[in-house]
Image (cartoon, helix red, strand yellow):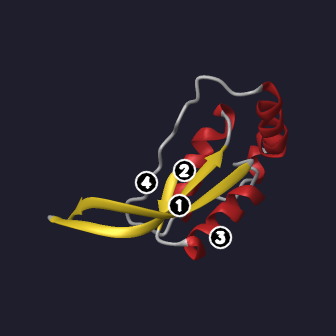
């Protein structure tokens, strides 16, 4: 999971991760509001939450690549480990990532 300033900044990152087979899906959820402390001040901004679906085998590469592509100086990169995932969905994710897992040297760094 990560947040972006808007859909325009999130879309190219999600598309790139999809093209590199590091995620199977990215879901953009607009309309969130974040309040946080930055450089001694409390900030309040609108953001887009992006849920990206990957698996354990691609996770490290996905996190590194997300941080490289993300426009924020300190991007939010959170890993949520579900207690349960349906077998059919897990199979779909695994199949979507198969090429990257087979050929990690083809990844863009």
Image marks 2 and 1: residues in contact by CB distance under 8 Å: yes
- The CA distance from mark 4 to mark 1 is 12 Å
Residue carrying label 3: 12
- The CA distance from mark 3 to mark 4 is 17 Å
Which residue is rendered at x = 48% and y = 59% of the image?
3
- The CA distance from mark 2 to mark 3 is 16 Å
Residue carrying label 1: 68
Image marks 2 and 3: residues in contact by CB distance under 8 Å: no
Secondary element at tag 1: helix
Q: Position of residue 20 (x, y in %)?
A: 74, 56
Q: Earlier in the sequence, mark 2 or mark 4?
A: 2
Secondary element at tag 3: helix
Please tell me how crowded label 4 is: few (under 14), some (14-19), or many (20+) other residues with Cα within 10 Å: some
- Residue with the most extreme bottom position: 8
Q: Earlier in the sequence, mark 4 or mark 1?
A: 1
Which residue is rendered at x = 55% and y = 31% of the image?
81
Numbered label attached to residue 76: 4
Secondary element at tag 4: loop
Q: Position of residue 106 (x, y in %)?
A: 77, 53
Residue carrying label 2: 64
Q: Position of residue 74 (x, y in %)?
A: 38, 60
Of discs 2 and 3, which sits in the foreground? 3
- The CA distance from mark 1 to mark 3 is 13 Å
Which residue is rendered at x = 61% and y = 60% of the image?
28
């Amino acid at each position: 999971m990560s947040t972006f300033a808007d859909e325009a900044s999130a879309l190219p990152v999600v598309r790139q991760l999809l093209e590199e087979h590091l995620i199977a899906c990215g879901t953009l959820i607009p309309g969130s509001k974040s309040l946080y402390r930055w450089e001694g001040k409390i900030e309040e901004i609108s953001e887009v939450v992006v849920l990206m679906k990957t698996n354990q085998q691609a996770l490290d590469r996905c996190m590194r690549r997300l941080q490289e592509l993300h426009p924020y100086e300190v991007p939010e990169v959170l890993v949520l480990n579900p207690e349960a995932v349906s077998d059919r969905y897990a199979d779909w994710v695994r199949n979507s990532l198969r090429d990257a897992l087979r050929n990690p040297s083809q990844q863009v760094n």
